[in-house]
Amino acid sequence: MKYVVAKGCSFVGDKKTYNEGDEIDEKVFSKKERFESFLKGDNPKIIPAPSVKDDEDLTGVDLTGVDVPTREEIEKLILEKGLLKEDKIKVFKDVDLLKFAVKKGLIKK
């Protein structure tokens, strides 16, 4: 299973900085137990990576001319339409969440 750094979190390990949305695994930590501790709790710092379907490929999505709403507004639109669940939304970087909303037609140019 693949994991990513949760929204608002970051880690430094293995001579690299891991920011929100970056893929991360237990090799970054000195002990497996330490890695697993970040997967637990009400606000885990490491979460399972979202599965990206082919129709969610965001390469080539043009944001030229898009009025950029706040992240909260984008999340609300996506949740209202039922396109993603809240735990999946959290792993998207802001720009990728915007691209997703544009691709799904929630935000017009």
Image (cartoon, rainbow, N blue to C red):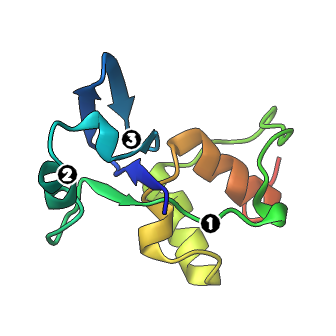
**Disc 2 residue type?**
Lys
**Mark 3 or 2, nearer chain start:** 3
Q: Marks 3 and 1, Cα distance to the nearest angstrom?
A: 16 Å
Which residue is identified by label 2?
A: 32
**Mark 3 or 1, nearer chain start:** 3
Disc 3 and disc 1 in contact, CB within 8 angstroms: no
Q: Nearer the viewer, mark 3 or mark 1?
A: 1
Could you say where residue 99 lies in the image, as x and y percent from the top left?
71, 48
Residue 104 seen in the figure: no
Who's the residue at 81% across and 57% down the image? 103
Q: Marks 1 and 2, Cα distance to the nearest angstrom?
A: 24 Å
Disc 1 is placed on an element classified as loop
Q: Is residue 95 above or below residue 74?
A: above
Which residue is identified by label 1?
A: 51
Could you say where residue 88 lies in the image, as x and y percent from the top left?
49, 67
Which residue is identified by label 3?
A: 20
Who's the residue at 59% across and 71% down the image? 78
Could you say where residue 57 lies in the image, as x and y percent from the top left?
79, 53
Q: Is residue 45 above or below residue 88?
A: above
**Disc 3 residue type?**
Glu
User: Could you classify mark 2 by the number of other residues whose Cα lies within 10 Å: few (under 14), some (14-19), or many (20 or more)?
Assistant: few
Q: Nearer the viewer, mark 1 or mark 2?
A: 2
Horizontal relation, residue 9 to residue 108: left or right: left
User: Could you classify mark 1 by the number of other residues whose Cα lies within 10 Å: few (under 14), some (14-19), or many (20 or more)?
Assistant: few
Q: Marks 3 and 2, Cα distance to the nearest angstrom?
A: 20 Å
Q: Which quadrant of the view contains residue 56?
A: bottom right
Horizontal relation, residue 36 to residue 73: left or right: left
User: Could you classify mark 3 by the number of other residues whose Cα lies within 10 Å: few (under 14), some (14-19), or many (20 or more)?
Assistant: many
* Residue closer to the observer: 90 or 105: 90
Disc 3 and disc 2 in contact, CB within 8 angstroms: no
